[in-house]
Image: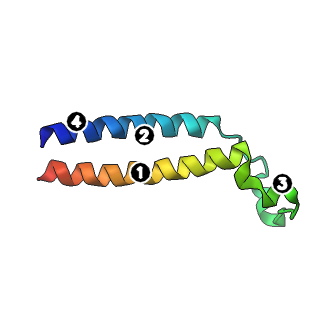
Amino acid sequence: MTVVKYILIAIDIIVCLAMIILTTMQAKDSQGASGTITGSTTNNFYEKNKGRTREGMLKRWTIILGVIFAILSVVLGVIYVL
């Protein structure tokens, strides 16, 4: 059981580091509060195909790694209780 703990800890650390790197690589949305008030969403080609761009891929992988990190953290918590 200790080998499984160490493997899960290593995977958790790798996922955490990858998530930090992906988060720092993302561009900042500069709409701020005025974009929230005015609702400045445009319906153009870029907005429709945003998932295929570099920013869309970075955002998608950040979400995936965040979910994996959360699941691994819960599993590690359960394993340490046992």
Residue 68 disc label? 1
The image position of residue 25, as x and y in percent, is 64, 35
User: Which tag, 4 or 2, sits closer to the chain's start?
Assistant: 4
User: Which tag, 1 or 3, sits closer to the chain's start?
Assistant: 3
Picture quarter containing residue 44? bottom right
Residue 51 disc label? none
Viewed as shown, does residue 61 lie left or right of 81? Answer: right
Q: Which residue is mark 2?
A: 15
Quote the CA–CA distance across marks 3 and 4. Answer: 44 Å
Quote the CA–CA distance across marks 4 and 1. Answer: 17 Å
Q: Is residue 38 above or below residue 64?
A: below
Q: Residue at x 78, y 56 (%)?
A: 49
State yes or no: discs 2 and 1 in contact (Cβ < 8 Å).
yes
User: Which tag, 3 or 4, sits closer to the chain's start?
Assistant: 4
Q: Which residue is mark 3?
A: 46
The image position of residue 62, as x and y in percent, is 55, 47
Q: Is residue 81 above or below residue 54?
A: below
Quote the CA–CA distance across marks 1 and 3. Answer: 29 Å
User: Which tag, 3 or 2, sits closer to the chain's start?
Assistant: 2
Viewed as shown, does residue 11 lie left or right of 19? Answer: left
